[in-house]
Image (tube, rainbow, N blue to C red):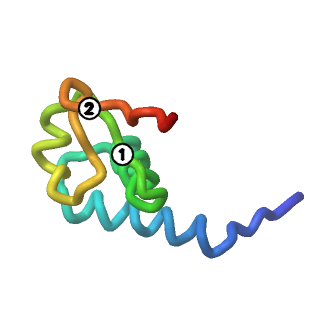
Amino acid sequence: MMVIVPDASVILNCLDVLRLMAEIKGISFYDASYHVLAVRGDGTYVTADRRYVARAGRKGHAVLLSQWKPPTRSQ
């Protein structure tokens, strides 16, 4: 049997997802996971789920698909 031990960054990511889910009731594990990845990577979680953005948008890094502007390419 092989035992895989996650490194500290994986554990911290999981804890952040669980914290977000505890703070904002009614959000899914998947939404929370993508949102945490966006926050940790200084990115943006783009979703069509209006209820999610209404609940979790105050955390930043989340925007509705209909309001998202793609980054412009530098010339």
User: Residue 12 at x, y = what percent?
Assistant: 51, 71
In the rendered view, would you say 46 is above or below 56? above
On the picture, is 10 further left or further right than 38? right
Residue named by callout 1:
44
Point 36% across, 45% down: residue: 44
Disc 1 secondary structure class: loop
Residue named by callout 2:
68
User: Residue 33 at x, y = what percent?
Assistant: 42, 50
Q: Amino acid at mark 2?
A: Trp
Q: Alpha carbon of mark 1 to alpha carbon of mark 2: how far?
A: 9 Å
Please, which residue is most extreme toward the bottom here? Answer: 8
Asked which quadrant contains residue 68, the reply is top left
3 or 68, which is in the foreground?
68
Please, which residue is most extreme toward the front here? Answer: 75
User: Residue 4 at x, y = what percent?
Assistant: 77, 63
Q: Are marks 1 and 2 in contact (CB under 8 Å)?
A: yes
